[in-house]
Structures are given as structure tokens and as C-alpha cells.
Image (cartoon, rainbow, N blue to C red):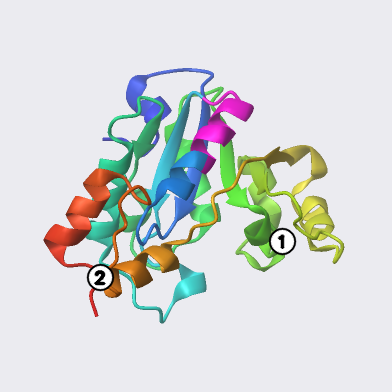
Amino acid sequence: MLPCAAAASGATGARVGIMGGTFDPIHIGHLACAEQVRAACALDIVLFVPAGDPWMKRGRDLAPAADRFAMVDAAVDDNPFFAASALEIDRRGATYTVDTLRELSGCCPDGTELFFIAGVDAVAALPLWREADRLGSLATIAVVTRPGYDTSDGRLDAARRLVGADRMVDVPIVGIDLSSTDVRAMVRAGRSIRYLVPREVADYIEKRGLYRA
């Protein structure tokens, strides 16, 4: 399957969202965020792209990439507007957003618009990303914002100047105060994660014995 859902369908002029992350594991917060951005930006599809070897999290003990992808694939299977891609997992070496966007741009039909979905805290650190000044030429950055986030330190303004203010769009969402770290800690403690992750993901974690002490 081609890494770009628009290319796989043969669609032209599609608006494709890209949601990256380690997804260790994927949870309802990720899914709710993607759905709200999909609606706000009129996206035809949101492509979930689990990181293979995320450079910003090197040295951290991650679940195997194959397991993280399998959980993402199971979590999005029932939504016709969501799809999973193993693009970053299949590509060797460290995972960089600019490489992913270049690859997707190359495989999608002419006229496809890419929207890279990222949290406001991640975008604030965007100047540290590889070839950050090239991101705006490859995709619109959909900045997921939450009420009360402090932007007074100027980091978001610096990111806007770097990629181009017209290449960033703020998408306010109703956030869910949940992280993958929380889910892993609950599994280690033997607590229920029902309703915090899709049932298929909870079943997969149980079957594979992931995140146990």
C-alpha cells in the first residue's frame, strides 16, 4: 500500500492530514484530536504515521515499532476518514518530519494539500527540527491549541516566522488530559485502561504483554 492515502485511492486535489507520533500506545486523546482537526480543516483523510526511530526520543525504551503500528492500525480501522501508514517505520535511520513530508509529497497526486498536525508545545520547539525552514513549502502546519496555553514566551512567533505565517493555522480543540505515559503507568500498575484506548488496542496490549513491569 502506498504511504499516501490519496495516492492509494487515486484522488486528486485531496486534503490529507498527517499525524505523527510514537503512539506508545495510541489512545483516545490522539483520535479525538485527529477528528477535530479533520473537521476544522475539511480534510479528506488523516494519515497516522507512527515514528520508527524518533530522534527526539532516542534512548527511551519504546515498544517495538511493529507493535505500535499494529495498535494504530487497529485503532483507526473502523473510521473511513483515518488510515495508518508504516512509512516511517519502514524507512531506516532516525525519523525526521521533513523526510516524511518530502516522501508523501512525492507519492501523492498533483493538487494534494498536506496538513501536518502537531501540538502547540511541539510547534514551539519547531526551530530545533531538521530543515525546519523547509516544512512550510511541503505542508500547512495545523497547530493544535488548548485553552490556557501560554504563548507569551515568543516561541510560537519564532516558528511562524520560520515556516511562514500563511503556512500555519491554529486549530483549537477540546483536549483530553491523557498521555501515553499515563496509559503505560496504568498497565504497569494493573489498572483498567478501558475507555482510555480503543478496545482493540487494550486487547492487543493484554495479548502481547506490553508495558508490564
The kind of residue on which mark 2 rests is Gly
Kindly report which numbered mark, 2 or 1, lies closer to the viewer in this rendering: 2
Image height check: is 169 above or below 81? Answer: below
Task: Work out whether residue 151 or residue 139 is closer to the camera in this orientation and state it.
Answer: 151
Which residue is the site of mark 1? 124
Label of residue 102 in the image: none
Q: Main secondary structure of the magenta part?
A: helix
| Relative image position of residue 172 (x, y in whole percent) | 69, 40
Whether residue 43 appears in this view of the structure is yes
Image mark count:
2
* Residue 20 shown left or right of residue 153 in the figure: left
Bounds of the magenta segment: 33-43
Q: Quadrant of the C terminus?
A: bottom left
Image height check: is 116 above or below 153? Answer: above
Q: Residue furthest front?
A: 191
Q: Earlier in the sequence, mark 2 or mark 1?
A: 1
Q: Is residue 40 magenta?
A: yes
Label of residue 190 in the image: 2
Q: Is residue 97 magenta?
A: no
- Distance from disc 2 to disc 1, alpha carbons, whole Å, reads 35 Å
The kind of residue on which mark 1 rests is Ala
Q: Residue furthest left?
A: 207
| Relative image position of residue 71 (x, y in whole percent) | 27, 51
Q: Secondary structure at mark 1?
A: helix
Query: Which corner quadrant of the image does residue 10 belong to?
Result: top left
Q: Secondary structure at mark 2?
A: loop
